Structures are given as structure tokens and as C-alpha cells.
Image: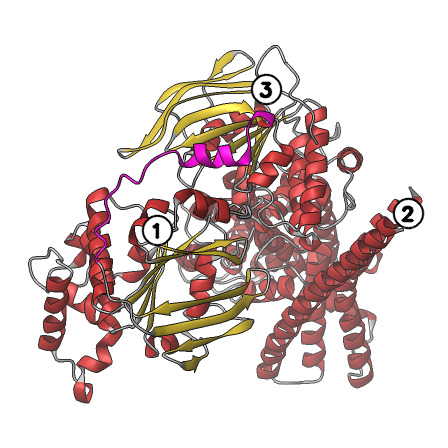
Amino acid sequence: MSAAPRPTPQPLVELRGISKSYGGVQAIADVSLEIRPGTVHALVGENGAGKSTLVKILMGVVHPDEGDVIVDGEVHRIGDAMTAYKLGLVAMYQEPAIFQDLSVAENVYAGRRPSTRLHTVDWRVMKRESSRILDELGVDFGPDTPVRGLGVADRQLLEIAKALSANARLLVMDEPTAALSPNEVENLFAVVGRLRDRGVAILFISHRLEEVAAIADVVTILRDGRHVETRAASALSQDEIVRLMVGRSLDALFPKEEAEIGEVVFEAEGLGRRGVFSGVSFELRRGEIVGLAGFVGAGRTEVARAIFGIDKLDRGRIKVGGRRFRPRSPRAALRRGIAYLPEDRLQQGLVQPMSVAKNTSMAVLPRLTPGGILQPWRERRLARRFMEQLRIKATSPAQPVSGLSGGNQQKVVLSKWLAAEPKILILDEPTHGVDVGTKADVHRTISTLAAQGLTILLISSELPEILGMSDRVLVMSEGRLVAELPRSEATQERVIRAAAGMREEAA
Amino acid sequence: MSLVDVRRLSPQAIVSALFRLRELGIFVALAATVLFFSIRADNFATVSNWQDIATDVSMVVVVAVGQTMVVLTRNIDLSVGSVVGLSAFVSSNTLAHHHDMPLIVIALIAMAIGLACGIGNGLLVAVGKVPAIIATLATLSIYRGILFEVTQGDFVFASQLPSNFLDFAAKTPAGLPNLAWIALAVALVGAAILRWASWARDFYAIGSNPDAARFAGIPVTRRVLTAFAISGTLAGLGGFMFAARFASVDAIAGRNFEFDVVTAVVIGGVNVFGGSGSVLGAVLGAVLVATIQNGFTLLRISEFWKIFFDGVAIVAAVTIDALITQRIQELLRRKRRAEIVGQERGAET
């Protein structure tokens, strides 16, 4: 798997000066890139470095603001998925687009079934041709196998078969190994190697740097939407890749207040959920902010959901305040003082036309209704308290939340959960998609809450946020807790190395 | 090489056997029903009774073939009863006023009305993006309302219709009633289309995964529209058959007929969430329901119990369907696990 990149006269695809911004946020800035036939080209970068946007541009899903996409030396405007397809640019997504009820052969030929002269479906050609491709890939299922029974790995091979039957010349593989076992990865790489030998270009996106080292001929590193480096894989060590991926100083300021860290309030021991995460053990202390880092899909959210009782835990035990806690339902978790803010809380957490007061009191209504009669003044008093504490900018508790800014809406959701007086607050990507000003506000709020004795588990894909806010950082990778770093030792490089599944070098 | 072939054949053989079993299950139920009524009801096992059943079932079969196509695309057409009524009245009323019109023209008129209704449904669902259950529930009322307006309280009586039309339903060439021949032809053509026509294979893909279908470049809107148009056209043909069979049509003709059709389709193993099912299944489902109803009539069992058993049959069919699907998946998984273990052993030696 170490074929040196062969010199080829002309790149298959060339990106020249591509820029793309979404509503003021620069996703891609002036990126240029050449992809040559018969090479495995790895694309690496942190979450949000611009990898997916680049793929979407190649696939015609997103249109660049500036720059050219050049295929076979000609500038093409790839307006839609069909155009990309016809040019031989095919993407394999993490969640394959597959028809469960149809056979493998029909899936391979989805959307372009061969027909006979009588315009009927040509089953013979379809089976023969898909059988040929499957043989070539060396897979062990046949054209008549119903897809419903295939596993994840086989479905991915099926996607490759689909691409091949469409004469793909560039195959984009976005985290193709995320759900595969080591054996299956090896098998997939063998297939990738065969494709490369046939002259197919492969754009390989992965967080696992070991895999990049194993399979890539060329590596391109993106950071903050910019092109950092493109080099032959043999000329780059994994450490260098990490350094280039990070490459920036902690510039954002985080208003971290020094809080007094108290006794252990939460203990998790050997938590596991089959196929998702396992052996997760950690402690949380009073007044502590603990960051939970890792790449998307590492199992962070899943752990939080299990603790909050949304998903079932298969293994492990939890103690809250020294007493055993079995997370059966969110209701039970709230009763024991655990609150969880999911990532898409803006949609899930608020009733837009209702007032700030009504939204704030939603989770604690029984407490405000002595004798079954709602006392609006209690609602208003509660809302005022949080408006003050969190600095919510609203004209009065009666203002509908639909009239508030995003950041202030965020704070209303927060007050809704705080009204339940939790002892432990799990925040999942609390600043995902908010502007810088609001971000700072949310950070300040989190910090203040911790100083008041609340324990916070902060899940975030933004490393600066994790590093800036946390007293301690836990790192997850592929469903396991792989590192625990105190604030003083947590650096971007160490966290990324751990998250990418690289071992700590013996220091 | 031969080893590979065996491995390839076996899971596939199991699955195809089980798929056949899915229709076999209805077959067994049908055989049991026939046996039961043959013993319990004196006049059940007679040629004339079977001809009655065949005539009863043929309308359901014709409309169920169209319904199957709609359901395959993860939609449903609840308006078919009203379409049957509307096309039955308009076509027979035309005939009542023009006795010399050839029957084929009358049938084409009925089908044209059905096609128009079907396109109406298709536009609402495929273009207007109204969920099919709501859109066709609305058109169920709308088409029925149009029928009330068209009839103005009138009836079409047998005495107004020419004798060749009245004879049409009664004739039994080669022992099978004319209507049953129509149903057989529609079922055969429908099954062939679902197997051989590229655009009809798309129905399975759309019902199986609508997003992926769009992504694969399948013209989803056009295909869904086509499915509804076919369902409407066949409901129109069903209306013609209704008029021929009963020779008396009023504004409530074909009411609740959608219930019989959907029952047949569901009992026939067509997945209501789209993607799987066959014409053969739907036909068998229709025959089973018609046989049970016929037997109950002969045994003088009350209307209530007939409806009750329709419901029981639906629950039973859906449960069995779910169990079979589950079993198939389990078998495949076990099969694969065995394969993987085998491979690893092979690799070790």
C-alpha cells in the first residue's frame, strides 16, 4: 500500500482560488488544489476546516463564490449533482444512499437501469455487469442479494461498485472507515488500492491519521478554510500533520473565572452502550467545568444522552452525590439534578410565540402551581431572576421569545434548565453556529454558573473553547475515553493526537 | 470458484424462498378458508358460487393493482371508491342515452374519467407535496361531491341500459366470467410492468428510499404522478365493471370500496411503507377477502362479523409480514456471521 505517486501529465481535477462563505462566515478562502488520476489524495483538517464544503463544491451541491473548478483542463461550472456525476466525480457518503428493498444489482444501477430494445429492464445485462464489478472488487455478495441484509462495510463496497459502474474517475470517500472494524478497514483499503491502480483518483477524508499514513499518496491540510500544505505523504510525519492542522495560537479570549472546586458529585464507571461506546469512566466535581473533546462521531453526545436517560446504557454504573443512579428517563435524570442541553436546542428547547416567562417556567410548572392553580406572578418572578442573572436582553418577561436575538434566546433556554435547579449541567455544543459576541456571552454565563457551584460537562468540537473553559479535559476517540488532561497539560496538539487515536509518545 | 458460487447462491436462495413463502402464506390461508367453507356451507363448492366469487373479486383486483403501484411509492390512494362511483355513473349514463355506443368506448370513457381523477391526486401529492393520505382523503370527498352534483339525485336503472351491456357481466367464456377475464389481464399486465418496465421499477426505489431516489436522478415527481394516474385509470375501469355487474348506479355507488382495496393490498403483503410487494400478493389478498365474505354470506353470518373478520385478517397479515421480515434479516445475519467465521478459519489454515 505504499506505491509512490506516479507522475502524471495532467491533473484530473484542479481547484483554483476557491472561496465560499456562508452568511459572513468564511468556510473556504482561496483554496487551490490538484487531484491527479491514480492517486489517493488525503484531505485532513479539524472540524470546520472546510473539508466538507470543498467536497460539496466538487459534487455540485454548493457553488463557490469565487474560483474555478477545472476538470480535464477545462473550466466547468458544476451546477448540480448530475453534472458532477457525468464528469465522473462521485462521492461516497458516510450514510450511503441505498435502497434497502432492492437487490444489489438494482442498487448498482439505481437511476440508470440498462434496457433492452423493447425498452424493458434488461435484467441479464444488469446482473452480468454488476456481477463483473463485484468480482473485480472481490466482495462476497452477489447481484441478487437483497441489500437489507448487508452490513455497513458491505454497503460501502456496494457504494464503490455503484461508482465504478458509473465510470467514476474521482471517488470522494468521506470518513469511510468511521463505522468499520479493523478487518473491514483492511479490506476496504485493499479495494482502494486496486482502484488507484486502475487510475481512479481518490479523495480520502479521515480523522484517523494512521489511516492517512497507510493509504495516502498525497496529503493536503486545511485549516480554518485555508490551504496550509500539500505534500507527498512520504514526506510528512503524523506529528507534522497535527502541527499543521493546529498551527495557531489560542487567540480567542475566554473569561474563565477561578471557581472553587469541591467534592465529587458525579461518578461514572465503565459506561458502555453496545457498538457506540464502552469503558467510559470519569468523575465530576462541584464547581468544575469539564471539557469533553473528540471528533464528531467519537461518542461524546451518545455518552451524554445515555447519562440523561435518552438512550439505554448497557453497562456501567453511575453515582450522583454518592448515591447510585440508574438513568431510565430524562425525567428521572432531572429529578436527580442532571440537565442536558442538546445541540439543536434552539428548535427543541423553545416555544417561539410564547413569552420569556412561559418558556422559562415550562419545566418547573408544578412548583409554580400550588393547589393546581397557576400563579402568573410566580412565573414572572422566576423569569426576572434569570433575566438578571444571565443578562437576557428582553423588554419584559411577557415579551415573546421570537422577538429576541439568537444569543438571548440561547439564554432563555439555559434559564429554562437552570430553573429546574440542576447540580450537573451537560452542554452539547453550546456555541455551535452563534456569532462571536453571543459566544463570549455564553462563555461568561457558563463560567459564572460554575463559580456558583454548578458542575458543567462541556461537549464541544471547538478546541479553543474546550481549552479555554475547562478545568479538566476528557478526550474521546471511537467510543472510548482515551485521555484525561488537567488544564495545565491540555494543549491543542495533545488533545488532537488523542482524538485522532495516536498514542502518547513516551515522554 | 465453486465455493464462491455456493456462498453466493445460498443466502439468495433462502431469501427468494422466503419471499415466495410470503405469498405462499396467503395461499395456505386461502386453501384453509376454501376447505372450511366447503365443509360448513352446502352451496359453497359449486361452479356457480365460484363464478360469483370471481365476479365479486375482479373489481377489487383491478383497482388493487393500481393501488399496489401507489403504495409501492410510499403513498396511498383513498379516493378509489369515489372514482369508481363517478366513472360508473358517467359511463353508464352515457350508455343509457346512446344505446348504440360500443362497450369499448364506454369502458374508455370510464377510464378517462378515472385518469383525470388520478392525475388530480397525483398533482396534489407529487407536485403540491400534500401527504397522500390527506390529499386522497380530500379527493375522496371531492370526487363524491362531484358525483352528487352530476347525478342530481338521478339513478341509472337496468331497464335504461342495452341488453348487450347487461349480458356482458353474466357471460362466462371458458367458464370464467368476463369481468374475471378483465381482472386477470390487468393483473398479468400489471405484474409484467412492475417486473420489466424501467419506470415501474423506480416505484420500488422511491418507496424504499425517497431521498436516495431523487439523488440517483430518478424523476420522483413524474413517477409518483404516473402511479396515481394508473391507480385512477384502473379505478375508472373498475367503475365500468361496477356498472356492468350491478346495472344500477346511483350517487353512493362504490362507497367504502377503498376499504376492500386497501385491505386486499395489505393482506397481500404490500408494505404500506413502500418499497416491497407484488401484484400476485395483492390478487391473492383480494381473493382471500372475497372468499371469506362469500362464505360468511352463505353461512348467513351477520354483516358485523364480516367487517370484524376483515379487521382481524388485516392485523394477522401485518403481523405475519413483520415476523417474516424479521426472520429474513435474522437468517441473513446468521448466514453472514457463519461466512465470516468460515473465512477467518480459512485464513488461519
**Which percent across, then down, holds residue A464?**
33, 45
Say if labels 3 and 1 share a chain.
Answer: yes
- Residue B285 appears in view: no
| Magenta part of the chain | A234-257
**Which percent across, then down, holds residue B61?**
67, 58
Badge 2 element: helix
Q: Of label 3 and label 1, which has the lower sequence position?
A: 3
The residue indicated by pointer 1 is A466
Residue at figure coordinates x 53%, y 38% from the top left: B215
Say if labels 1 and 2 share a chain.
Answer: no
Kindly indicate the quadrant of the structure image that contains residue B22. Answer: bottom right
Give me the C-alpha separation between circle 3 and circle 1: 38 Å
Closer-to-camera residue (A12/A428): A428
The label nearer to you, 3 versus 1, is 1
As drawn, the residue found furthest toward the right would be: B2
The residue indicated by pointer 3 is A36
* Amino acid type shown at disc 1: Ile
The residue indicated by pointer 2 is B3
Relative horizontal placement of residue B117, taking residue A448 as reference (left or right): right
Badge 1 element: helix
As drawn, the residue found furthest toward the front would be: A507
As drawn, the residue found furthest toward the left would be: A395
Relative horizontal placement of residue A326, taking residue A35 as reference (left or right): left
